[in-house]
Image (spheres, rainbow, N blue to C red):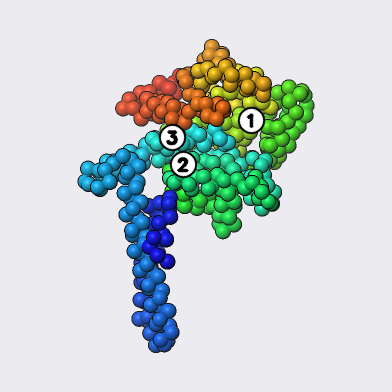
């Protein structure tokens, strides 16, 4: 192996450091064996010399790549590549700020959650994503049925959103095969499936993949139980499966009455509940109301933790309504659905977009049965929820999504004003004396 062969783009500072340690270990291991078993003959000595040489090559190559990665990391932050004292100080200061950032827990799934995480990771490393495992469609559903593993899709998206990788690595992990038996399957899903195969649990597999991709923060499945989501429709019909709920027949236009799991006593991941209790702010969404957000609230202990935590709880409503799930829903309809599956008063603040979208795009969405969520402010405020309105939308490839930077900035402003300010105790006392005590009562 040549040193130049080790210069793999996006391998990362942490991985090069580990490889450097591995090379040093090889050298030490070879020296120890030679000293202890030198009487084994010339062939053994030659083998150990080759092993030591491999260690030396690994050390030299990883050291060179490590230095290159550090300089590249500094350049990405617009700091002088000369590695002067001021530049290094700025870099360390930036990292220190991120580590000491607010403790944010984001709960949900789908593309909405991963979009928000991309913005939040710029402000804090104390970030935990709690992700639903009810998905049973597409590539995730195939792996779930074939391998008996929990669905990897939503978790993969969150890991990639928080990962510190090069664009080529992001593109590789998001690549979907176009032909053959793997058609439609994501390489990232297969990566996590392979990690699951060499791990003792799905939780461990997620943590290992996060380590490999140098994830900022933590990504956790909300539960390790193999659950299926069911929906009861107002016309009395019951639908089994998250995919079927989101793709049901729209002709009846009957609303979803409630969603539930196909089994009782679904246990939460202990670390997930602990993160809620320790958070400064908990964010629900954005994402599909009935198939990405509410399934997390159905897991035992999650709602109780949301009621007991001193963190503020914020709901980020989708920009658009969603066919088969929230057609013709107003903002208050979204909130009522959450409270129906949890408890009234669980939400403290609601972030919602009030900016319009281009007329031609609005018309295309309307033809598909979707529209901008109507913000009935007076109704929501009477529910005891404070509204945070503004332009939080982004139009990308003719799709309306949340703008990750605008949304993250508003959430950070909120947590800074209410939790991290110097007047924190006074604000919390006022906040608890207002009406939040009703949530526990």
Q: Is residue 196 visible?
A: no
User: How far across and down, in percent of the image, does residue 199 sit?
Assistant: 56, 57
Residue 267, compared with residue 19, is above or below; it is above
Answer with the quarter of the image where residue 55 lies.
Answer: bottom left
User: How far across and down, in percent of the image, does residue 371 sit?
Assistant: 61, 20
Task: Residue at 61%, 42% (x, y): give it.
Answer: 133
Which residue is denoted by mark 3 in the rendering? 120
Element type at mark 3: helix
Give the CA distance from mark 2 to mark 1.
24 Å
Checking the image for residue 290, the label placed there is: 1
Residue situated in front as seen by the camera: 118 or 234 = 118
Residue 375, compared with residue 99, is above or below; it is above
Label 1 neighbourhood size at 10 Å, few (<14), some (14-19), many (20+)? many
Task: Residue at 39%, 53% (x, y): give it.
Answer: 14
Element type at mark 2: helix
Residue situated in front as seen by the camera: 430 or 349 = 349
Determine the residue located farthest toward the top in the rendered image: 378
State left or right for residue 292 relative to residue 406. Answer: right
Label 2 neighbourhood size at 10 Å, few (<14), some (14-19), many (20+)? many
Which residue is denoted by mark 2 in the rendering? 162
Element type at mark 1: helix
Label 3 neighbourhood size at 10 Å, few (<14), some (14-19), many (20+)? many
Question: Which comes sooner in the sequence, label 2 or label 1?
Answer: 2
């Amino acid at each position: 192996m040549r040193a130049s062969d080790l210069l793999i783009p996006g391998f990362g500072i942490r991985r090069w450091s580990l490889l450097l340690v591995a090379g040093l270990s090889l050298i030490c291991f070879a020296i120890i064996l030679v000293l202890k078993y030198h009487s084994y003959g010339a062939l053994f000595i030659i083998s150990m010399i080759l092993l030591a040489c491999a260690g030396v090559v690994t050390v030299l190559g990883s050291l060179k790549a490590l230095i290159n990665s550090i300089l590249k990391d500094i350049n990405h932050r617009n700091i002088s590549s000369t590695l002067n004292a001021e530049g290094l100080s700025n870099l360390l200061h930036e990292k220190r700020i991120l580590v000491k950032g607010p403790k944010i827990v984001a709960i949900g799934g789908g593309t909405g959650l991963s979009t928000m995480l991309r913005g939040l990771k710029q402000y804090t490393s104390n970030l935990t994503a709690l992700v639903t495992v009810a998905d049973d469609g597409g590539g995730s559903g195939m792996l779930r049925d074939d391998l008996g593993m929990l669905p990897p899709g939503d978790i993969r998206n969150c890991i990639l959103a928080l990962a510190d990788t090069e664009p080529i690595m992001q593109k590789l992990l998001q690549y979907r095969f176009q032909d053959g038996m793997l058609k439609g399957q994501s390489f990232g899903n297969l990566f996590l499936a392979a990690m699951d195969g060499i791990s003792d649990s799905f939780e461990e597999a997620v943590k290992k993949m996060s380590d490999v991709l140098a994830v900022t923060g933590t990504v956790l499945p909300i539960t390790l139980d193999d659950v299926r989501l069911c929906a009861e429709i107002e016309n009395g019909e019951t639908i089994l499966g998250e995919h079927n709920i989101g793709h049901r027949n729209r002709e009846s236009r009957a609303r979803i009455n409630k969603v539930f799991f196909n089994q009782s006593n679904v246990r939460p991941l202990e670390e997930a509940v602990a993160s809620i209790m320790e958070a400064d702010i908990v964010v629900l969404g954005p994402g599909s109301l009935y198939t990405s957000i509410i399934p997390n609230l159905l897991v035992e202990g999650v709602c109780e933790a949301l009621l007991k935590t001193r963190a503020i709880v914020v709901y980020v409503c989708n920009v658009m309504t969603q066919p088969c799930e929230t057609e013709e829903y107003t903002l208050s309809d979204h909130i009522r659905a959450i409270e129906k599956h949890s408890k009234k008063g669980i939400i403290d603040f609601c972030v919602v977009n009030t900016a319009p979208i281009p007329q031609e795009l609005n018309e295309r969405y309307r033809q598909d049965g979707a529209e901008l969520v109507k913000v009935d402010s007076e109704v929501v405020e009477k529910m005891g929820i404070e509204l945070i309105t503004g332009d939080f939308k982004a139009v990308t490839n003719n799709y309306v999504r949340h703008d990750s930077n605008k949304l993250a900035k508003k959430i950070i402003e909120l947590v800074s004003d209410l939790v991290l300010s110097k007047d924190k105790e006074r604000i919390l006392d006022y906040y608890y004396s207002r009406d939040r005590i009703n949530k526990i009562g």
